[in-house]
Image (cartoon, coloured by chain):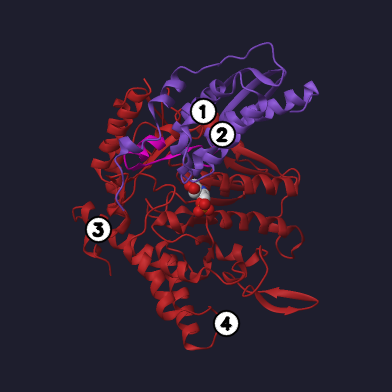
Amino acid sequence: MTAVTDLSGAHAVYDVDRVRKDFPILGREIHGRPLVYLDSANSAQKPQVVIDAEADLYAHHYANVARAVHTLGSEATNAFEAARDTVAAFLNAPSRDEVVFTKNISEALNLLAYSFSNASTFPGAERFRLGPGDEIVVTEMEHHSNLVPWQLLAQRTGATFRWIPLDDEGRLVSAAIDEVINERTKVVSFVYQSNALGTINPVARLVARAREVGAISIVDAAQAAPHLPLDVQEIGADFVAFTGHKLYGPTGVGVLWGRYDLLAAMPPFLGGGEMIETVDMTGTTYAAPPHRFEAGTPAIAQVVALATAVEWVQGVGLDAIHAHEVALLEHALEVLPTVEGLHIVGPTTAVDRGATISFTLDGVHPHDVAQLLDERGIAVRAGHHCARPVCVRYGVAATTRASFAAYTTLGEIDALVAGLREVGEMFR
Amino acid sequence: MSMPSPQLESMYQEVILDHYKHPHHKGLQDDFDAEVHHVNPTCGDEVTLRVRVRDGAVAEVSYDGQGCSISQASTSVMTELVTGRQVTDALGLQEEFLALMQGRGQVEPDEESLEDAVVFAGVAKYPARVKCALLGWMAWKDATARAVAGEGNPV
Ligand SMILES: Cc1ncc(COP(=O)(O)O)c(C=O)c1O
């Protein structure tokens, strides 16, 4: 269905030029230079098929979902629910009813944290109850979206908020894992691939340890979904979430996958239309998952276009994308350190690490680096990447971050290196 | 859309880099009427600034700070501009600079009054950096208001 479908064969040569042709924005010039977009970890660009899918729904099949009996309502509902099938297959979910659409991964994680606190008075939800003496565990490398909701939950319930610390290389302190996750732990929520460091965490070990102590395990796969095949059965966690806009999909849509038995016992987060079974002035009963967690009119066109994004990724092939990104990563890890004064913050080898690289440049503030690179057409991110504790851990106020995607080329990495050399010289 | 060449457009004029590398009035002075500490959370820029006011004029401004080149150079340029001026005149300059920064690149800077500070005109097009350029100016305004209030002779 896309121009690149024929690349899906496992042994096909990865044709990055062909992939790039799917992204109209990559033809743009910025300040008279060709755009070099190295900020995909922040948000990925969109292939034309995704842009078209959203427009097509509005142009030809639009009405509200789930409540209309007319033709357009039925078409929109069918497209929306077909998207659920597509996402369920993408995740290898045992059931489509385990796929909940949210507005982004931040909402998915907050949904869990608020449902858990609602469990304190919800019949049959003892499994999710937390109180003083219980512990919630995250890691020191979490995005604020997987950190603040759990701090808030700890405050609401009196549970203790704990974290697995980072070592000097940007990995979890291995020896701390079994100590921090212990018999008191009720929830373990951690990032699969760090947006700030690029580190890929030992997911199997963390999930196994959580299971061993009877804790609920949650995986923030926002940065993993665009780069690694995600199989929720293989991962074995209780919940896995990702966000659409980093997976070449639209903004306004995220996904929470959860084990059906847990979702079925979990209290609702938001109340409203579509999440009920029956409503009475004296009380309400709730719909079964996934609808229990989808109050109100969802992001219909965006959900449909997310499915198109998933199909686009499957068309190119996640294995092929991954192999391409590993090649980019290895090249970048080799050439970036040749820039005078550049220091990588995070793992310096391609082992258990994704194609997202944070660094500092001696004597130049990251915002100046990013601004000066922008003047050369190169888009990178600068700041604390919504993971401020990571910057604190490594004693830097901010870093510059370059992140790669299916459409990134080796030439763009060389352009980054050349740009960084020029920036360094200006400040010397 | 055709774009001017990066050289012509660069936000980083020589003056900015000069002030960043060789800041003026940096280093806190002991004789002062008011001290403030301002931060810009987006860049993590920080400035601690001291002001001494005498006979309705800005007698001395000194500061210490760290952060991006825009915030540090803008603070340095500001100290040059306001020192020795009547407080009312200096506040007028501050307002002119503020209007330039908030003008989204639409306000024509007046080199006559703003002197070296006109080099920051390019910053106005980048909303994320406007706070950097304003950091020192806002700190100075705050400190001066406190100094004047402390003196008990409002301007
Ligand atoms: C690891 C990780 N988790 C969560 C998020 C939050 O994503 P969103 O803003 O789409 O909710 C991000 C995005 O920056 C991320 O990188």
Q: Which residue is most to the front? A: B112
Secondary structure under tag 1 reads helix
Question: In this figure, which residue is indicated by the disc labeled 4?
Answer: A67
Position of B95 compared to A247: left or right? right
> Could one spot residue A420 in this view of the protein?
yes
Type of residue at label 3? Answer: Lys
Which of the two marks, 3 or 2, is nearer to us in this view? Answer: 2
Measured as percent of width and height from the top left, residue A72 is found at 47, 84
Tell me the tag on residue B74: 1
Q: Nearer the viewer, residue A200 or A36?
A: A36
Position of B13 compared to B91: left or right? left
Which of the two marks, 3 or 1, is nearer to us in this view? Answer: 1
Type of residue at label 4? Answer: Arg
Q: Give the magenta range.
A: A370-388
Secondary structure under tag 4 reads loop
Secondary structure under tag 2 reads helix
The reply to whether the residue tagged 4 has its Cβ within 8 angstroms of ligand 1 is no
Residue at mark 3 to residue at mark 4: CA–CA distance: 39 Å
Question: In this figure, which residue is indicated by the disc labeled 2?
Answer: B134
Give the quadrant of residue A57: bottom left
Chain of the residue displaying label 4: A
Measured as percent of width and height from the top left, residue A303 is found at 46, 68
Near mark 1 (Cα within 10 A), the count class, few <14, some 14-19 or many ≥20, is many
Q: Residue at x 40, y 63 (%)?
A: A90
Type of residue at label 1? Answer: Ser
Residue at mark 2 to residue at mark 4: CA–CA distance: 52 Å
Question: In this figure, which residue is indicated by the disc labeled 3?
Answer: A21
Could you tell me if the residues under marks 3 and 4 are in contact, i.e. CB atoms within 8 Å?
Answer: no
Secondary structure under tag 3 reads helix
